[in-house]
Image: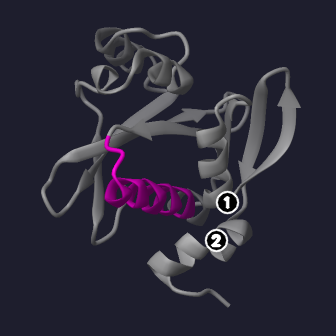
Amino acid sequence: MFGDSVISTTDFGNAEVVSKFKYGDWHLIVGDIDTNEEWVQFLKDNPHFIESYLLITKEDNQPFAFFYLLHEYDDKNIVSFHGGGWNNSLYYTLLHFRSAFLIARSLTEKGIKVRTYCKSYNEKAYRFLREVGYIKYRQVNDTIEMYFSERKMKRSKLYQKFFGTVV
């Protein structure tokens, strides 16, 4: 799974996450699902296509975010990364970054290519993804498509703060 001495993950199960977000914010993460019941059913109906996890702090064993991986139909070695967190303090913002670094690094170590996309008007997500190491490669209408660059991630000041300078 994904994690380190600070963060762990667990399967999503039936966790309640939709209500932890404002309606509009949730729809920036998952565009066409409105309730937690619909999300859980979608996960159950599509286990070959989507994996979803909760991110948990090891300090207090409490979830603070979730993410999901969409598997590309044409290639099992490509996934699209998406997710969000509901705690907005500086501490949790740093945990969100740390988690995203760990997930991307773990996937690339397994030979999996990681992509993502966000809406052009979702500036917060776009800035976050760029800091994690994603690079824009295309924009179609209002959707920015990005791919993960391990090299860019390792040059991130936050990454270096968490995991040390990489030569």
Which residue sits at x=87%, y=37%?
A: 138
* Residue 114 coordinates in the image, percent (x, y): 65, 49
Which residue sits at x=67%, y=60%?
A: 133
* Residue 167 coordinates in the image, percent (x, y): 68, 91
Few, some or many C-alpha atoms within 10 Å of disc 1 (few <14, some 14-19, many ≥20)?
Answer: many
User: Which contiguous range is marked in magenta?
Assistant: 87-105
Q: Quadrant of the N terminus?
A: bottom left
Which residue sits at x=40%, y=34%?
A: 52
Quadrant of the rendered image containing residue 4: bottom left
Which numbered disc flags the more N-terminal residue, 1 or 2? 1
Q: Is residue 147 left or right of residue 14?
A: right
Q: Of residues 52 and 58, which is closer to you in this image?
A: 58
Decide if residue 68 is in sight here: no
> In the displayed structure, would residue 107 be above or below residue 162?
above
Magenta stretch: residue 68 in it? no
> In the displayed structure, would residue 1 be above or below residue 31?
below
SS for callout 1? loop
Q: Main SS of the magenta segment? A: helix
Instruction: Determine which residue is flagged by label 2.
Output: 156
SS for callout 2? loop
Q: CA distance from mark 1 to mark 2?
A: 7 Å
Q: Is residue 162 left or right of residue 110?
A: left
Mark 1–mark 2 CB contact (< 8 Å): yes
The disc label shown at residue 133, or none: 1
Quadrant of the rendered image containing residue 67: top left
